[in-house]
Image (tube, grey):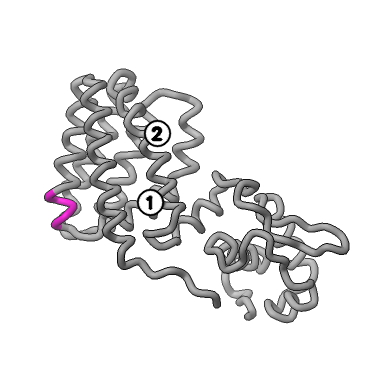
Amino acid sequence: MTFSAAIKRTLSDQLVDDLGRKIVQGILRPGDTLPGEDVLLARYGVSRTVLREALQVLAAKGLLDARPRRGTTIRPRAAWSQLDPLLLHWHGELPADDPALQQLMEVRRIVEPPAAALASRRATEADRARIAAAYAAMEAAGENVEAFIQADLEFHTALLEASGNQFLIPIVHAIRTTLLASLHVTNTEAEQNRRVSLPLHATILRAILEGDHEGAAAAMQQHLDDTERLRVQASQGSPRPQPS
């Protein structure tokens, strides 16, 4: 495998992307030892400087452990920088039945219902207008599933930011990529979006606009229950990544 220098990303970026994907997908597993430098240089057609730079980037993200005379090994998942944007991006490409998406749903269940309750209490007029505008964009998406997904993502992002919790904001940005992946799994049909997802979001919006914190939390929980149902359905026919 060789990389094209015509792509705007550097060769190091491309190598990081390829190896990182293989690690997150489980093609390269924790405890595995990477081939030696000469093998990797021949495989990827890059310079030694590029290879070492890429391995340093992956090590900084907690994925690799390089030691003299032992080689470079894949670290346990517990050591990975799971909120790193690139790791989240790679997780977002996993199939619907991957445990990472289930864990994302667990994070959403922990964070989003209480955040909806906080938003109902703390949202400014600008926050409410932003959430309402996102819902309006979902309504206007019609048959355009991608437009619906982008508006849905904006709805959840705006709601989380309207919670007014300064420590939640970094988490909002950190999970954005993986949340988008989750929406691509569960929001695949325009009719499903109109019939089920829109009414659920309308209930959340109404509770926030009315300052009903209990109603906002309950509506968000109901929405996440439906999202989990769709994720499980999608996972039944989801292909697993194969070694390449």
Q: Which mark is residue 143?
A: none
Q: Is residue 57 visible?
A: no
Q: Amino acid at mark 1?
A: Leu
Does residue 185 appear in the picture of this structure? Answer: yes
Q: Is residue 110 above or below residue 38?
A: above
Q: Secondary structure at mark 2?
A: helix
In front of the other: label 2 or label 1?
2
Judging depth in this view, the residue of 43 and 96 nearest the camera is 96
Direction from residue 180 to residue 2 in the image, left or right: right
Which residue lies at the image location 21% right of the left edge and 25% below the top edge?
215
Residue 170, percent from left and from top? 51, 35
Q: Is residue 48 above or below residue 169?
A: below
Q: Position of residue 69 (x, y in %)?
A: 87, 63
Relative to residue 147, is residue 51 drawn left or right? Answer: right
Report the front residue among 15 and 91.
91
Q: Which residues are magenta?
A: 191-195
Number of labels in the image equals 2
